[in-house]
Structure formats: structure tokens, C-alpha cells
Amino acid sequence: MSTAGLAVRALGFAVFAPGSVTVLGPYLILQAETGTSLPMGPGRFAGIAPIVLGGSILAWCIADLVRSGRGTPAPWDAPKTLVTRGLYRMVRNPMYVGVLCTLVGEALLFRSAWLLAYAVLVWLVLNLFVTVYEEPELTRRFGESYAAYRSAVHRWMPRRPV
């Protein structure tokens, strides 16, 4: 498939998955929320930076998965080769880190304790998904190259590439 075709499919998945977690979920929470805002006056606008950072991380990672991995973030349309470039050199799950940055930024911007709790819940679900499904699947698919990558790059905490 062409790179443009993969990009369109990746964008579709991004709207569906990360989009529903970072846009639809927070929207529904904010619609239902009553009187649970965090006490942060104008400082709440500091939430804009993590939102922009999270969105940028997602876009960069999707581009790397399409160009380098020849696939999309969707499990049913996964990259054909292991992607270890770009942000994947610093952390094994940069897309999930981007989602979490976005959610924390939204919690700050909208001064929402419920959004912050939602971010924690999303992290717990993502961590479970990564440890129970994703890492065993990547080990099965990429074998020793993924094992070496796993030992060199942390799951969640970014560090400088070697």
C-alpha cells in the first residue's frame, strides 16, 4: 500500500482511538461535571502546553509508524517493521505518553479533578493493555529485535537515546 493510503488509514484510526480518549471522553466528563474544579485561577492556561505537546507527540509517532513501520497504530493494521526511530528511541510507548500529556493538560485547562482522575484511569488501562497484549504480541512478531529494544528503552519514562 502507498504511504498516502497508510496515512489516511492511520488518520482514521487516530480520530477513532486517541481522538475518542482525548476529546470525546473529556467532553462527556465535562458535560456531567458539577462543582469539582481544581483551584487554579489563570494558571490553568498552563494546560495548553501539555495539550499541544501531546498532540504533537501523537502526530510525530503516527508519521513514524506510517513511514518507518509501513503500518498504522491500529492493532489490526500494525507496522510491518519495528519502529525504533524518533520518539520511539526515548520511550517504548510515546503515543500513550502523548495521550496522557493531553489529558493532564485538559484537566489543568478545565480545572477538572474528574478529568485528572480520568487521566489516571486511562493510564491504568493503557498499562494493562501494554503488559497483557501489546508487549507479548510485539515479542512474538519481532522476536529478538524487540527484546533488545525492550531492554534498551523504558516503557513509560523518557530518557535520552543511546
Image: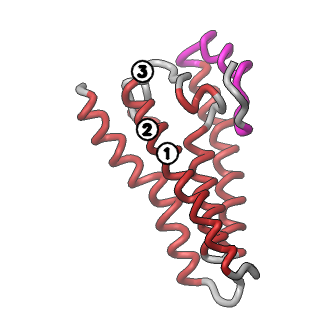
Q: Is residue 144 magenta?
A: yes
Say few, some or many: other residues with alpha carbon within 10 Å of mark 2 (under 14 / 14 to 19 / 20 or more).
many
Q: In which quarter of the image is the N terminus?
A: top left
Is the residue 70 above or below the residue 52 in the image?
above
Contact flag, marks 2 and 1 (Cβ < 8 Å): yes
Q: Which residue is located at x 65 percent, y 18 percent?
A: 149
Say few, some or many: other residues with alpha carbon within 10 Å of mark 3 (under 14 / 14 to 19 / 20 or more).
some
Say few, some or many: other residues with alpha carbon within 10 Å of mark 1 (under 14 / 14 to 19 / 20 or more).
many
Q: Which residue is located at x 53 percent, y 44 percent?
A: 57
In the displayed structure image, the side of residue 67 where residue 28 appears, left or right: right
- The total of numbered circles placed on residues is 3
Between disc 3 and disc 1, the foreground one is 1
In the displayed structure image, the side of residue 23 where residue 6 appears, left or right: left
**Magenta segment main secondary structure:** helix
Closer to the camera in the image, 137 or 30: 30
Image quadrant where residue 111 sits: bottom right
Q: Where is residue 112 in the image (x, y as percent from the top left)?
A: 67, 76
Mark 3, secondary structure of its residue: loop
Specify the amino acid type for callout 2: Ile
The residue singled out by tag 1 in the image is 58
- CA–CA distance in space, label 3 to label 1: 19 Å
Q: Residue at the top extreme?
A: 144
Is the residue 26 above or below the residue 85 in the image?
below
- CA–CA distance in space, label 2 to label 3: 14 Å
The residue singled out by tag 3 in the image is 80
Q: Give the range drawn in magenta.
A: 140-157
Closer to the camera in the image, 15 or 127: 15
Specify the amino acid type for callout 3: Lys
- CA–CA distance in space, label 2 to label 1: 6 Å
Q: Does the magenta stretch include residue 142?
A: yes
